[in-house]
Amino acid sequence: MPLPSLAGCAVLLIALLTSGCKENGTDSDAIAPTNASSARVATADPDNTAKNVRDRDGATLTAGDQGNSPADREITQKIRKSLVIDATGYSTTAKNIKIITMVGKVTLRGPVTTMAEKTGIAAIAATVAGPGNVDNQLEVKNSNP
């Protein structure tokens, strides 16, 4: 059986590449892309207005308040590492909490999925920072809204 010529291969390749195209460059049978807002029919958008106002008033610690001393950074790093490698398997939500250390005092903020995660994370922080040096502001959120 003879091998096809180079010109024959080029024609075949062009035919294959253009076989699915239409003249106007669109395909009316294509599935329309969806966006996140159309997928959420029955749920309301989250309203964080009150939390944003609270965080701007200066009384609440945010991640920007993290201490820059080597000791503060080390405490935060140890807590984060312990949380991430913990064998009990904290949820992704719990692993993404804010850990803010200032002058040896740790503030824990953010959502967790269960009360067990809240108390477990506080225990890890107390082990690293010492008893009485943890302000546990974690919020337990229902994982099934």
Image (cartoon, rainbow, N blue to C red):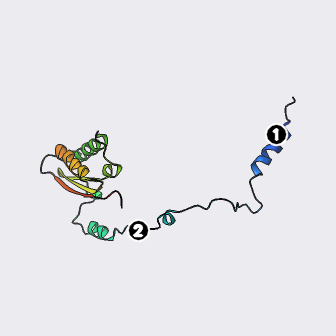
45 or 70: nearer the viewer: 45
The kind of residue tagged 1 is: Cys
Q: Residue at x 24, y 60 (%)?
A: 61
User: Which quadrant of the figure contains the C terminus?
Assistant: bottom left
Q: Is residue 33 left or right of residue 88?
A: right
15 or 32: nearer the viewer: 32
User: Which quadrant of the figure contains the N terminus?
Assistant: top right
Spot occupied by residue 65 in the image (x, y as percentages of width and height):
26, 58
Mark 1 touches mark 2? (CB < 8 Å): no
Q: Is residue 133 left or right of residue 8?
A: left
Identify the element where label 2 is drawn.
loop
Q: Farthest top residue?
A: 1
Q: Is residue 94 left or right of residue 106?
A: right
50 or 88: nearer the viewer: 88
The residue indicated by pointer 1 is: 9
Spot occupied by residue 103 in the image (x, y as percentages of width and height):
17, 52
The residue indicated by pointer 2 is: 45
Identify the element where label 1 is drawn.
helix
